[in-house]
Amino acid sequence: MTLALTVVVPCYNERANVAPMVAALDKALAGLAWEVVFVDDDSPDGTSAEAKRIAQLDPRVRCIRRVGRRGLSSAVIEGALSSAAAHIAVIDGDMQHDETRLPLMLEAVIGGADMAVGSRHVEGGDSAGLSSPLRVKLSETGIRVAQMVTHTSITDPMSGFFLLRRELFDTLATRLTGQGFKILLDLILASPRQLSIAEIPYKFRPRVAGESKLDVLVLAQFAGLLLDKALAGRVPLRFISFALVGIVGVLVNILVLQIASAAGADFGTAQTIGTIFAMVVNFQLNNQLTYRAQRLKGARAWRGLALFMIVCGLGAIANIGIAKALYLENGRSLFSGAAGAAVGVVWNYAVSATLVWRVR
Ligand code: GDD
Ligand code: MN
């Protein structure tokens, strides 16, 4: 029997859900030649070990343990690229998606659709599993924006539950950004032609074990994905994020400078306090947004902050030195200042990427 379906399951801290997932697939896909690949980013709870324990007993089960990397989209991509089956399905590893819908989704794609998407928002679907009113609001806003940019009317463009032909995935793979959570959108935006999408309603179940990894900041990553498309990938997203954070830092610096001055500090002291505040805020924002995938925590965050301040301090010295030299040469203050600042930003970005967050 030729392999019909690879089910890709991204998972992070889902140890307790692995065995139930395999059992559920075994039931839902009875009669089909299928395999499941758990893609785990080296979860501290030992998700990989659990998946491999089951894989030893069941050849339909595989596990990819990724080290030094985090991210739902990139995990899905790597799992899908490891497939040799005719079709690929992607499903969450927390039992929130309804695996009994998979045969129906497969049928839709065999029947001619480019993709089948499990949807919580069509007639018969249900998003009861979404935990808070804020999540519901966020999700609605995201959906509207996503429908606009993709020129599609699919009702659940943020879905993480879908199925497509492997050959289609393989062609789109090199065009994916692999950033953030929205792998379905990434695929739709990567396609040069309009994809025909069949929507299959399902009930989004509440989580039983483990906890959600999605939060408000995911929306910022989503905005980043759209921006990356708009710029056709010419400027690295991380750099844009870093530069935007830098602008916030300048505003913080000015604000604190004003407050400290008003409180009676002399200019030198006020500016020093402002700069330190700006650096701490910048570090925090970069740690939460720009380098979310390799966020530093605990003692490593403190060490990172110290390194970041040294790197940015050197960046400031380079900035001032270059601006001064240019100013002496041509006397144009705005141009010289801007050139110095540009060199400073590029320096801060390049050096903190390798020293503070060590992007691999
Ligand atoms: N490998 C890997 N790496 N897996 C991850 C990572 C990661 O960095 N982050 C999350 N996952 C896995 C989780 O373990 C889970 O199996 C799945 O990805 C979805 O993560 P959840 O944290 O459970 O997301 P959710 O339930 O809040 O989000 C749902 O709604 C989104 C749309 O609003 C999911 O259905 C998403 O797929 C969907 O995009
Ligand atoms: Mn979930």
Image (spheres, grey):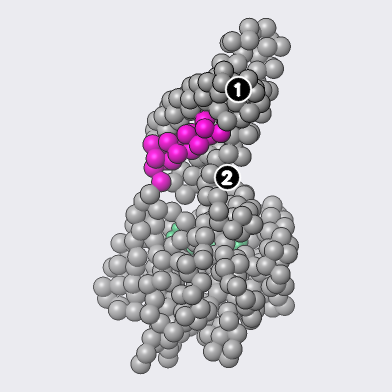
Residue that carries the numbered disc 1 in the rendered image: 330
Give yes or no for residue 356 being in the magenta stretch. yes
Residue that carries the numbered disc 2 in the rendered image: 240
Bounds of the magenta segment: 342-359
Residue 157 percent coordinates (x, y): 64, 68
Q: Residue furthest front?
A: 330
Give yes or no for residue 71 being in the magenta stretch. no
Q: Give the SS element for disc 2.
A: helix
Q: Is residue 268 above or below residue 244?
A: above
Identify which amino acid the numbered label 1 is placed on.
Asn
Instruction: Classify mark 2: residues with Cα within 10 Å, few (<14), some (14-19) or many (20+).
Output: some
Q: Is residue 303 above or below residue 153?
A: above
Mark 1 lies within 8 Å of ligand 1 (Cβ measured): no
Residue 273 percent coordinates (x, y): 58, 17
Q: Residue at x 70, y 72 (%)?
A: 152
In the rendered image, the quadrant that contains the N terminus is bottom left
Q: Sequence order check: which comes first, mark 2 or mark 1?
A: 2
Q: Is residue 151 left or right of residue 170?
A: right
Q: Main secondary structure of the magenta part?
A: helix
Identify which amino acid the numbered label 2 is placed on.
Ile
